[in-house]
Amino acid sequence: MALIQGSFMSETLERQVGFTAILPIDSFGPPMGGQAAEPKPLRTLYLLHGYSGNGISWLTSYEMGKMSNENNLAIIMPNGENHFYTDDDTFGYGWGAFIGKELVDYTRTVFPLSREPEDTMIGGFSMGGYGALLNGLKYRETFGHIIAISAALITIGAEEQQDDGFFMALFGKKAEVPGSHHDPMALASAAVEAGGKLPDIFHACGTEDFLRALNLKMKEHLERISYPGYVFEEDKGGHDMPFSTKYLFRGVAHACGREV
């Protein structure tokens, strides 16, 4: 396994942005006394951290290297700050465009990554789960799989609440969120109506998670519109790393066509 930390100048964000990459390079080497496997483009997971995290947050789980090697999977973990991975309406910073296009394009030029949607996943926990749903649906020609764990779907029902500064800086007025480019429900409906190949969605939330009600509303919506390739799982657990790591593993295995 190779662990790489890098940064590059983002045009959409107008500054240097960092990321961490895990690559299963060891799998290219020969086993004891054997012959080296032929290198081929890697499956890739663009893995998004939660609120107040950064590009190394997932490294607190020792399982990331195991996941990379078991699935011959490159894992790209960007620094997303606290911007919910969406194109904000106040400062014009394109966090969605950065995650869904610029980061993908850059890492594909630097690392031996597959360019096929079926080999390309986007996933995340909490704020990252929201970002995975939003950008996986928006850039569905790029991502073949979405893994959303305990998603912070704070845009659901926002129109029924009073405006506040933080929310407005990212999403605009709450009354205008439904149907906007910040609304994963609207993006899912539009994707189904447009037809064509859609990314499958693996969605999980703990029964003790404080965001469970919002995740169940997203589940109900996706089932109501008959979104193809949608899987929802829930289990005892809260909004924490043990639950998110367990179900991230299950989501990756599902995307790779392995038993979960």
Image (cartoon, rainbow, N blue to C red):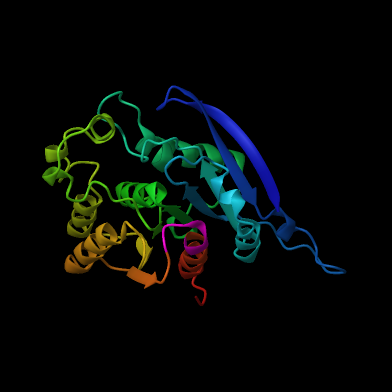
Does residue 224 show up magenta in the picture?
A: no
Which residue corresponds to the image point at 26% horizontal and 25% vertical from the top-left?
A: 90
Residue at x-position 18% and y-position 65%: 225
Residue 202 found in image quarter: bottom left
Residue 242 lies in magenta, yes or no? yes
Residue 209 lies, with reference to residue 233, above or below; the image says above
Q: Which residues are magenta?
A: 238-243
In the rendered image of this protein, does residue 170 appear above or below residue 34?
Answer: above
Question: How far across and down, in percent of the image, does residue 115 sit?
Answer: 49, 50
- From the viewer's side, name the closer residue of 71 and 203: 203
Q: Position of residue 57 (x, y in %)?
A: 55, 46
Please state if 241 lies on the left or on the right of 166 as rendered: right
The residue nearer to you, when weighing 230 against 168, is 168
74 sits left or right of 28 in the view: left
Vertical arrangement, residue 48 with respect to residue 69, above or below? above
Q: What residue appears at the point 59 percent right and 41 percent down from the top-left corner?
A: 20
Quadrant where the N terminus lies?
bottom right
Q: In the rendered picture of this protein, how many numbered marks are placed on residues? A: 0
The spot of residue 156 in percent (x, y) is: 21, 51
In this view, the residue in front, 11 or 167, is 167
Query: Which residue reaches farthest right?
Result: 33
